[in-house]
Amino acid sequence: MGKITPKAKMTRKEIRPDNGRKGGMVSMSKVITVWGSPGSGKSMFCCILAKALTRDKRKAIIISGEPGTPMLPVWLPEQITTTNVSIGQVLSSVEIDTSLVASHVTVLKNYPYIGLMGYSAGENPLSYPETDYNMVLQLISSARRLVDFIILDCSSAMTNVFTPASIESGDLVVRILTPDLKGINYLKAHEALLVDGRFHYHEHMTFAGMARPFHAFDEMGYIIGGFDGLLPYGKEIDRCATEGGMFQAIKYCNSKYTASLNKILDALEEMEFAEQQEEEGYEDGYEDEEFGNEEYEFGEGNEDE
């Protein structure tokens, strides 16, 4: 497998409330939302993406909001996780802040650059009160102050408010569909639920997940407006999933999977560059404004005298 690297290394920035600047320009982490049809390999993709994003020792948190399939025991089959670290504890709190979120992140023992949040073994959709949409937004807002990347592993069901709230919060939204009739009809059924502008539906990147040679990519892509890339099925990747080694799967990605990862890295790099340009423009404008204010105040002083 070719080495997965962005064309230019993105600069890591310290995350703090206002960057020490007047006016409150904030350098926040990037939120990547992953949603799509059932069985398309979304959760595996999140693990592979997390490894790709943290190769230069930046940090990422993967957050799963699916209580129907608790992900902590899937990610960490050899590590006992109690309900004390469950995301359900956070989402059912009165108020969510950064310290609460941090206390419920489980860090990989052998790879400390990736943290995990999800439901614990034995939990189910009735283990906690119904999740409030705004609490999910609070969770994401608080989590993004902790690390460089937040990866949101969404349920395929829009009735789980974690999914639409995550799509709304995403700086980059990745849509993964199986390139078959099930995937196409899943998309058609859910498009109407995401017409509100806050979901940026037409800006999502779309990938064919669990793609196999017999799939009719061109025909399926034509129906949905095209795929941005393929995430092919691989026996070794599948074995990593079944044997509890999801964070080892990146070693088995073929060239097409790698090319899709690089498209996402490039998109994030472009966002970073645009943000830097905006901040530089803000700094220049602020300096001009400061100089202007000083001139104005000095003039007022002369008039008073």
Image: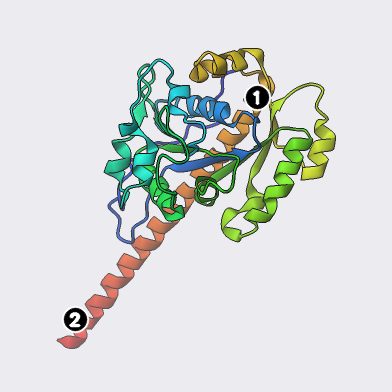
Residue 257 marker: 1
Q: Residue, x 50% and y 46% (percent of image)?
A: 162
State left or right for residue 291 relative to residue 178: left
Q: Position of residue 193 (x, y in %)?
A: 64, 54
Q: Residue, x 48% and y 23% (percent of image)?
A: 74
| Quarter occupied by the C terminus | bottom left
Q: Which residue is mark 2?
A: 301
How was this image coloured?
rainbow
Eye-nearest disc, 1 or 2: 1
Residue farthest along the bottom direction in this orientation:
304
In the figure, residue 110 lies in which quadrant? top left
* 189 w.r.t. 11: above or below: below
In the figure, residue 224 lies in which quadrant? top right
Residue 193 marker: none
Q: Residues within 10 Å of mark 1 (few under 14, many from 20)?
A: many
Name which of mark 1 and mark 2 comes first in the sequence: 1
* 218 w.r.t. 31: above or below: above
Q: Position of residue 274 (x, y in %)?
A: 52, 48
Name the secondary structure under disc 1.
helix
Q: Position of residue 30 (x, y in %)?
A: 46, 42
* 13 w.r.t. 130: above or below: above
Q: Residue, x 56% and y 18% (percent of image)?
A: 241
Q: Pointers 1 and 2 in contact (CB under 8 A)?
A: no
Q: Amino acid at mark 2?
A: Gly
The answer to whether one can see residue 135 in this image is yes
Q: Amino acid at mark 1?
A: Tyr
* 165 w.r.t. 120: above or below: below
Q: Position of residue 178 (x, y in %)?
A: 71, 32
The answer to whether one can see residue 145 in this image is no
